[in-house]
Image (cartoon, rainbow, N blue to C red):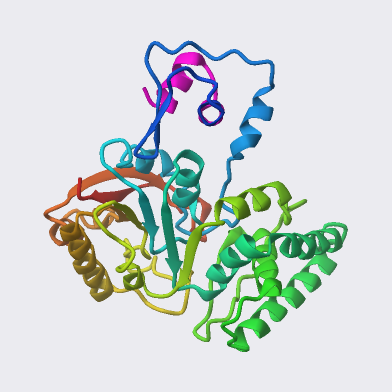
Amino acid sequence: MSTQEAADKWGLPQQLVIALCFENQIDNVTLINNTWHIPYSAKKPLTSKSPDEHISVVTPVKPFLKWAGGKGQLLEEIANLYPFEKFSITKYCEPFVGGGAVLFDILNKYYLDEIFISDINQELINTYIVIRDSVEKLIYLLATMQNEFIPLDKDRRKKYYLEKREQFNNLIISESNSVCIEKAALMIFLNKTCFNGLYRVNKKGLFNVPMGSYKKPLICDEANLRAISKMLTNVSINCGDYRESQNFIDENTFVYFDPPYRPISSTSNFTSYSENAFDDCEQKKLAEYVQELDKLGAKIILSNSDPKNSNPDDDFFDVLYSSFNIKRVEAKRMINSKANARGLIKELLISNF
């Protein structure tokens, strides 16, 4: 049985079962294709340690940013499609990593030989690299900003926020491709304090989101950042076009694509990740790339919006991925200026297996 099945059977958190497998505390447990396999006859493990002491061996991580289009709410649906237990998968690739909800879920549950992530957003990738390579310096800067920001009243918070936003944009304007710890700290600070956690830039590529309203935002999550840093140790992190993943991908690779979604209406399109558009032409180019990887034998899942939310006759993705499996799942629209417009919609999960 899987770790989730064992967790349900024994009434334990799945992360605790994974930790107990890692510690060889469950009889005859085996690791096959990077997935723990537990005999149905295995007895519930007894231990004098607290659950927290076990789980600390493999500290679970969560996304360090709130990200428009993040897959937290669809994670269970996506995880149900993971190919790890059915195929020989040793590598994982995520060419539109964004906030990394799927990445971190996989890092929490599986042990893989190689992982490659990328995104076209330079500031986002800079932050991933800084967390991996310079987490203690990052934590120091974030803790400083948190201690300065939290005690301020609303007006002084706004002034502080605007100063940090200008500072962040000045670093963007400098167009330096070198890794910048200060820029990473500012990106996390702005994400934790801006309106709705939205990352949006103008046509010049500058961050332009106003301050949000939070009583005591957690700007510096030390434990999570340190745990992420450890898990990213051997992860290849690339800033660039999704096609740059091609040399990494082979028949032993699971690839998850979460591209900028196709707008479900003429009024729902806004640029939130970068100043670059991802129109229907780009969606078609991505589909061609996905089909190339399918021929290599890679296992692929792709998510996108369902055009049928607004037009029942719109078969754009049904035609584009006609040779793939298409599953429609419910999701809540989170980014909308009107709260009453944040309702349930359909999204697509497209796979080749």
Residue 81 figure quarter = top left
**Which residue corresponds to the image point at 41% horizontal and 38% vertical from the top-left?**
76
Residue 57 in magenta?
no
Magenta stretch: dominant SS? helix
Image quadrant where one finds the N terminus: top left
- Residue 283 position, x and y percent, is 26, 69
Is residue 315 visible to us here? no
Q: Is residue 288 left or right of residue 1?
A: left
- Residue 171 position, x and y percent, is 66, 82
Is residue 338 visible to us here? yes
Q: Is residue 347 above or below residue 26?
A: below
Residue 285 figure quarter = bottom left
Q: In this view, does 111 lie to the left or right of 157?
A: left
Query: Which of the two residues, 291 or 32, is positioned nearer the viewer here?
Result: 32
- Residue 65 position, x and y percent, is 59, 57
- Residue 89 position, x and y percent, is 31, 46
Query: Which of the two residues, 131 or 343, is positioned nearer the viewer here?
Result: 131
Query: Which of the two residues, 177 or 161, is positioned nearer the viewer here?
Result: 177
Image quadrant where one finds the C terminus: top left
**Which residue corresponds to the image point at 80% horizontal and 71% vertical from the top-left?**
160
**Which residue corresponds to the image point at 37% horizontal and 74% vertical from the top-left?**
241
Q: In this view, does 333 lie above or below 204?
A: above
Query: Which of the two residues, 202 or 311, is positioned nearer the viewer here?
Result: 202
Q: How many labels does the image show?
A: 0
**Which residue corresponds to the image point at 43% horizontal and 13% vertical from the top-left?**
42
Region of the chain picked out in magenta, as a range: 1-19
